[in-house]
Amino acid sequence: MKRLLLIINCLLLAVGTAGGPLVMRLYFLRGGNRVWLSSFLQTAGFPFMLLPLAVSYFRRRAAAAAERTAKPSPVSMKTPLLAASVFIGVITGLDDYLYAYGVARLPVSTSVLIIASQLGFTALFAFLLVGQKFTSYSVNAVVLLTAGAGVLALHTKGDRPHGESMKDYVMGFVMTAIAAALYGLVLPLVELVYKKTKQPITYSLVMEIQLVMSFSATLFCFIGMIINNDFKVYT
């Protein structure tokens, strides 16, 4: 069951990582210009995580009933872990906005190449925050995956919108680079939370952390939409 859940999560992550930038870029190419809305949608699917959490809770409840022990709590997160998850979620929301801003102004080939640099940032921050040692395997992985992203950028005609100023293009480049660095920080921060928490790391706890992070990121972008008057488009 653990391997099945891991495989399902990996497949969903692969589909989202591959298809997300294409769909987002298509939105901007077809006349869309709401960056906050695009960033909001990156984590707006968090309610779907309630389903596996509900299944996990009822399984734990049934097991407790069979063993005649106390009923488990629907929420297993403690306050410090909740606060840490909210903090990382806000950083994720900011990263979503920076990434959407960059995708709005860069060709997919260029944005993919820049985002690939987050592998290097992840390795660096993992070394600094959680003591992840550099090995020949990790170095080779970073180099090969980054080089692979570079190959994608070769011999492409690009899809830069007509009439886009050089200033906007450069800003998109800078924002995407910052987004790559910020996402490279988020992953080691999550690993640090796992190491520092005094609770057993279970599937339910991991899903709760992801739920809080995604909710916080979505709320951050939702507030940005309100400030940017995005809802006036629909009135």
Image: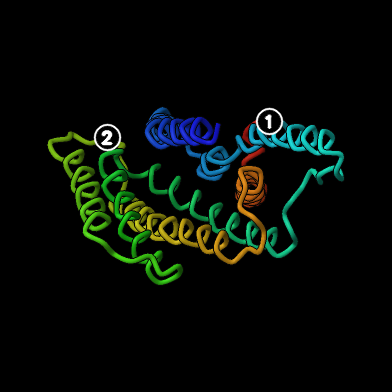
Amino acid type of the residue that numbered disc 2 sits on in the rendered structure: Asp
The numbered dot on residue 156 is none
Q: Which type of secondary structure does the marked residue at label 1 adopt?
A: helix
52 vs 162, left or right, is right
In the image, 154: left or right of 63?
Answer: left
Which percent across, then down, holds residue 166? Answer: 28, 52
Of all residues, the one furthest to the bottom in this rendering is 128
Placement of the N terminus among the 4 image quadrants: top right
| Residue at (20% x, 48% y) in the render | 144
Residue 110, image quadrant? top left
Q: Nearer the viewer, mark 2 or mark 1?
A: 1
Q: Which residue is mark 2?
A: 159
Give the answer, above or below, for where 34 lies relative to 136: above
Amino acid carrying label 1: it is Leu
Q: Position of residue 216 (x, y in %)?
A: 65, 51
Q: Residue at x 62, y 41 (%)?
A: 230
Q: Nearer the viewer, residue 165 or 130?
A: 130
User: Which residue is under mark 1?
Assistant: 51
The percent position of residue 129, horizontal first and vertical second, equals 45, 70
Vertical relation: 165 (above or below) 51: below
